[in-house]
Amino acid sequence: MRMKLNKSSQLALVSAAGFLAATLVTACSQLTQSLTVDFVYVATSQAAGPNAYGEIDVFEIDSESGHMRPIPSSPFPSAGRDPVAEAVSADNEDLFVANQDDNTIVQFVIGTDGKLYPFNTVNTPGIFPLALAANKANLFVVDTYQPLPICSTADPCSGSIAVYPLSTATGSTPVTLGSPAVNPAVSASYWPISLAGKADILTPTAVNVLASGSYVYVTAYDTSATPSAGYVFGFAVGSSGTLTALPGSPYAAGTHPSAVASDPGSAYVYVTDYAKGDVFGFSVTSTGSLSPLTSGIGGTNAFQTGAQPSAIVSDPAYPYIYVANSLDATVSAYSMSNGALTSLGTYQTGLQPVAIGIDPSTSHFLYTANFLGNTVSGFELSPSAGTLVETQFSPYGTNSQPTAVAAIPHKGTGAGVTP
């Protein structure tokens, strides 16, 4: 026998079913949010059309499985062409993105749900920005070439670094980018990455500011020398963002340095050599200058990596260093003791990893942006051993040609992660 319902009874059932569905959706949403430990931002450089913006894929990391899933509304426009670098403000409320083809830095305010909201855009002093680093006081921007009319793509010269002071966020007003600090030696808002008294053309590759905020380091290589020569330029950071070259700077660093990182205690600096397949270790002296370690291969400061290392990260909580090897499509893991690196193994990633990061909430998950694979690889990190295990369903799809990664904690505190 089939029971017939009147219209009011049908409406009551529909209403009850709708309420149940809404309750389940809300419960699932709250459960998903409660399991989210971090939001990860992956810049992707290739978009359709010659003037199209790049994009930023946003993932949330599951605290139990490490699974990375896109958040609703992802991806977001990068508000510029060819985004190549990212940095997070010290309060984890803002994401800075360098758009290389536009010579711009775009500041995004980060919502509590991880979504991005464009807030401010500034032009860099030089041409083709390629690397960013941030701390509480400053945003450091490295450009491929010094400003026009000094340099151009037709008449290239060495690169430069600029410093944008950052204000403290107050209430509903986010961190604000101030006018870049002025270098009195050139009466302009940049510091050349060049060899004094020489016309050699140096190409910068990466930047790192110590956790202490006192010193900043820029890697570069000399393409006019045969064979090419690599350097680390060191600067003391003044209270107004002005830079002063450190004693002995620049420091020799192989032939083609590609990335730079420092340990959480600001005691050591590590530089990868893209051409040699090494990572060079330095101790930081009391003046900020760099002294080569002697615990590496043959008593040198070199420690072997995979082929064409392109990115490096130091675990903010544990004594481990990780290097992304672009040609091998691997991550090399190391333990760190008194600056010396000991290999812990090699782990497969997606094709051509070019950026690497560690989650800032727990220091328990690691990820790489894989340029040719159009993916991001995820790993679970063992706090006791430093070894890696690939996370559930890794690698995860991104938009075309990912170039950089950065992350913030979900409803927590911690340091932002930079490529």
Image (cartoon, grey):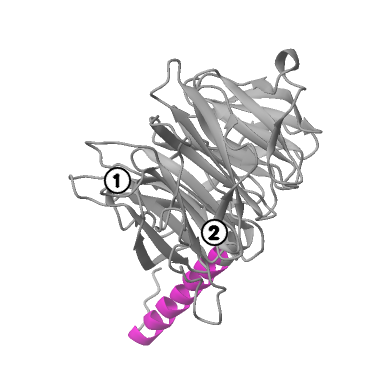
Classify residue 317 as left or right of residue 33: right
Residue 391 in sight here: no
At x 33% / y 84%, what residue is drawn? 7
Label 1: how many residues lie within 10 Å, few (<14), some (14-19) or many (20+)?
A: few
Residue 295 located left or right of residue 36? right
The x and y percentages for residue 170 are 56, 80
Mark 1 falls on what kind of element?
loop
* Sequence order check, earlier mark of 2 and 1: 1
Question: Observer-nearest residue: 128 or 50?
Answer: 128
Identify which residue, 29 or 408, lies in the foreground.
408
Q: Which residue is mark 2?
A: 242
Residue located beneath label 1 in the image: 150
State how many labels appear: 2
Q: Nearer the viewer, residue 270 or 332?
A: 270
Q: Are marks 2 and 1 in contact (CB under 8 Å)?
A: no
- Residue 16 % position (x, y): 47, 78
The residue positioned farthest toward the bottom in the image shown: 8
Q: Tell me: residue 58, above or below residue 248.
A: below
- Image-quadrant location for residue 344: top right
156 part of magenta stretch: no
In the rendered image, residue 9 lying in the magenta stretch gets the answer: yes
> Does dot 2 land on a helix, a strand or a loop?
loop
The residues colored magenta run 7-29
Image x and y of residue 190, in percent: 43, 53
The 10 Å Cα crowd at callout 2, few under 14, some 14 to 19, many 20 or more, is many
Q: In the displayed structure, does residue 54 sit left or right of residue 332?
A: left
Seen in the picture, residue 97 relative to 221 is either above or below; the reply is: below
Amino acid residing under circle 1: Ile
Type of amino acid at the residue the image marks with label 2:
Thr
Residue at the image position 54 percent from the left and 17 percent from the top: 276
Q: Quadrant of the N terminus?
A: bottom left
Tell me which corner region of the image, top left, top right, bottom left or bottom right, holds residue 356.
Answer: top right
